[in-house]
């Protein structure tokens, strides 16, 4: 099942097992069951601390449990073959069940162990092997099931259990169910899941944040621009904090990155993890899972600026750098919100496998839209690409590839007008021919929206100067219209929304904030006294 290189890597990882584990396979005579047994036998061969038990039948076939030999309550379960992006989830589950300590903050581990649970929490996560968002969820819940015996989790390959997916009408991954009810969809980390379960967590976190002393530089946003700002500020030896709704930002939703200079290929989650680790090498106070909702400028020159958070807390700082990035632009038509994650999707890499053999549409003829249509064409029955303009805007090489595919139809001058469904899932898409002013309907099951980005700046309206597109207006020093407030990255008027440009702009903002501090009396006096 595994090639020689993967076997060598697996053997090196499993040296870290501290206690014996048992793999319990639930299989039948099918091809996938035989593949699963081959995979598990490769794992057994990689360590003398691993044994295998094969049984016929079970709740889901093929599936397997990873169980600690001396304590069967410590376990993790996978339904299907966790390869692709989920192979790392498998390796981590093996290590955690086998007693290897997770690389998680000690207070988070204690929070999981101390959860006051009435009965059991039974989680089920549907994933796809091509989904870059799924591993975070699978790994978080697998770890929780290892740490707390009242938490159970099974990670399910949606493509392998199609009938189950259709019964539950799962149309987006990751989809998480708790005790049979939908708990959440999309990327969620361990701390975010904990916050939803532990009802007192928000109040405790707000109290902790309110108790913090003021910062010299506070960065709002944890994407490439925010990470660069934090590093450049911290290296100056000043008190630096980061407030991030999710550290990594939109990079976490990016599949392939091939234009990051000096790195020919990487993936978004990998880069986001590297950014976070680099920031953590410095004395930076990271406040993750915190959404900014308000900015209060300093009342006097050189005074403190206040950032208000959704949980009721507020943070004060002598300077602020806003790097809140951007999000996928929505179509803004009737039915889109109603059928989001029920046929309307924004990540073809994540959700494409759930539409295998079905009819889909891609909205948008730029590079992202055409790339999405090309990817989907290898999975689905048919793709219709709709572009508002008279012609596609994607690179010529992508267009040539698109037009060579037999199961793709391209419609230009098409204005999407409505998403139709039966109450539980998408059934068709309505659009208007802009040339002939005629209405048309396409029968389909999935719609992938790829029409650009919107800056995350609504919370700043009325406080800071924004462009007509909602972008933060900045000068060549990253200064905004408010003294002491700087901005960087995709949320600003800087053209070309690229990762490497955001990093450069974030570095500039960090340097500009420091320059502002040393030129204003109050912060300079404070630093001189240190």
Image (spheres, rainbow, N blue to C red):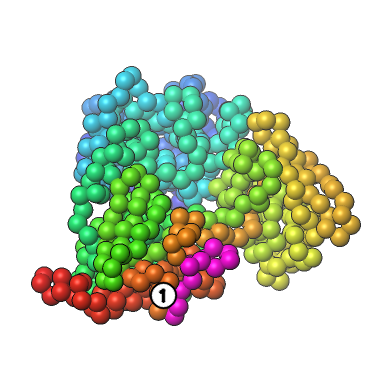
Q: Is residue 301 above or below residue 317?
A: below
Is 526 in front, or is 70? 526
Q: Nearer the viewer, residue 415 or 463?
A: 463
Confirm whether the magenta stretch covers residue 466: yes
Of the pair 354 and 342, the residue shown nearer to us: 342
Residue 63: x %, y % from top left:
47, 30
Q: Is residue 64 visible?
A: no
User: What is the x, y in percent for residue 383?
Assistant: 73, 50
Q: Secondary structure at mark 1?
A: loop
| Number of numbered labels in the structure image | 1
Characterize the local packing of mark 1: few (<14), some (14-19) or many (20 or more) Cα atoms within 10 angstroms.
many
Q: Is residue 374 magenta?
A: no
Relative horizontal placement of residue 143, taking residue 133 as reference (left or right): left
Question: Which corner quadrant holds the C terminus?
Answer: bottom left
| Residue at point 69%, 47% (across, down) | 333
Q: Residue at x 20, y 49 (%)?
A: 211
Instruction: Please tell me whether residue 245 is drawn above or below residue 514 in the rendered image.
Output: above
Q: Which residues are magenta?
A: 465-476
Measured as percent of width and height from the top left, residue 154 is found at 43, 31
What type of secondary structure mainly makes up the magenta span? loop
Could one spot residue 459 in this view of the protein? yes
Work out which residue is located at the far top of the displayed protein and give it.
119
Residue placed farthest to the front in the image? 300
Residue drawn at x 69%, y 58% as measured from the top left = 364
Residue 119, position as x, y percentages in the image: 33, 19
Q: Is residue 297 left or right of residue 185?
A: left
Residue under the image location 62 percent in, 52 percent down = 330
| Residue tagged 1 | 478
Residue most toward the right?
436
């Amino acid at each position: 099942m595994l090639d020689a290189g993967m076997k060598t890597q697996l053997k090196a990882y499993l040296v870290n097992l501290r206690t014996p584990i048992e793999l319990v396979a639930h299989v039948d005579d099918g091809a996938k069951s035989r593949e699963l047994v081959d995979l598990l036998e490769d794992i057994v061969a990689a360590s003398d601390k691993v044994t295998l038990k094969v049984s016929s039948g079970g709740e889901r076939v093929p599936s397997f449990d990873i169980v600690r030999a001396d304590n069967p309550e410590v376990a993790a379960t996978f339904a299907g073959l966790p390869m692709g992006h989920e192979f790392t989830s498998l390796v981590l589950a093996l290590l955690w069940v086998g007693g290897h300590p997770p690389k998680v903050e000690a207070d988070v581990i204690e929070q999981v162990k101390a959860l006051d649970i009435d009965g059991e929490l039974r989680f089920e996560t549907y994933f796809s092997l091509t989904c870059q968002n799924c591993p975070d969820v699978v790994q978080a819940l697998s770890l929780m099931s290892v740490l707390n015996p009242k938490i159970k989790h099974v990670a399910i390959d949606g493509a392998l259990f199609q009938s189950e997916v259709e019964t539950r009408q799962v149309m987006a991954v990751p989809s998480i169910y708790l005790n049979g009810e939908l708990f959440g969809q999309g990327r969620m980390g361990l701390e975010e899941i904990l916050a939803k379960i532990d009802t007192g967590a928000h109040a405790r976190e707000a109290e902790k944040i309110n108790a913090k002393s003021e910062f010299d530089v506070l960065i709002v946003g944890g994407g490439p621009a925010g990470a660069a700002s934090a590093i450049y500020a911290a290296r100056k030896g000043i008190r630096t904090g980061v407030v991030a709704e999710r550290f990594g930002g939109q990079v976490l939703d990016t599949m392939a990155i091939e234009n990051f200079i000096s790195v020919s290929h990487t993936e978004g989650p990998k880069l986001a993890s590297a950014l976070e680790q680099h920031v953590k090498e410095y004395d930076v106070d990271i406040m993750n899972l915190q959404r900014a909702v308000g900015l209060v400028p300093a009342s006097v020159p050189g005074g403190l600026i206040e950032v208000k958070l959704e949980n009721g807390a507020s943070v004060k700082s002598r300077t602020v750098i806003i790097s809140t990035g951007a999000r996928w632009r929505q179509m803004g038509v009737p039915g889109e919100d109603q059928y989001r994650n029920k046929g309307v999707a924004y990540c073809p890499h994540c959700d494409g496998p759930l539409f295998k053999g079905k009819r889909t549409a891609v909205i948008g003829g730029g590079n992202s839209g055409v790339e999405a249509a090309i990817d989907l064409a290898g999975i689905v029955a048919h793709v219709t690409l709709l572009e508002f303009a008279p012609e596609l805007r994607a690179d010529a090489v992508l267009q040539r590839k698109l037009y060579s595919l037999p199961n793709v139809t391209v419609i230009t001058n098409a204005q999407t007008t409505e998403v139709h469904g039966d109450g539980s899932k998408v059934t068709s898409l309505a659009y208007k021919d802009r040339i002939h002013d005629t209405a048309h309907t396409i029968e389909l099951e999935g719609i992938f929206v790829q029409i650009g980005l919107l800056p995350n700046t609504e919370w700043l309206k009325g406080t800071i100067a924004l462009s007509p597109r909602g972008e933060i207006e900045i000068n060549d020093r990253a200064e905004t219209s408010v003294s002491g407030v700087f901005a960087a990255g995709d949320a600003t008027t800087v053209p070309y929304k690229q990762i490497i440009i955001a990093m450069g702009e974030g570095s500039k903002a960090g340097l500009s904030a420091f320059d502002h501090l040393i030129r204003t009396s109050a912060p300079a006096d404070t630093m001189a006294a240190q």
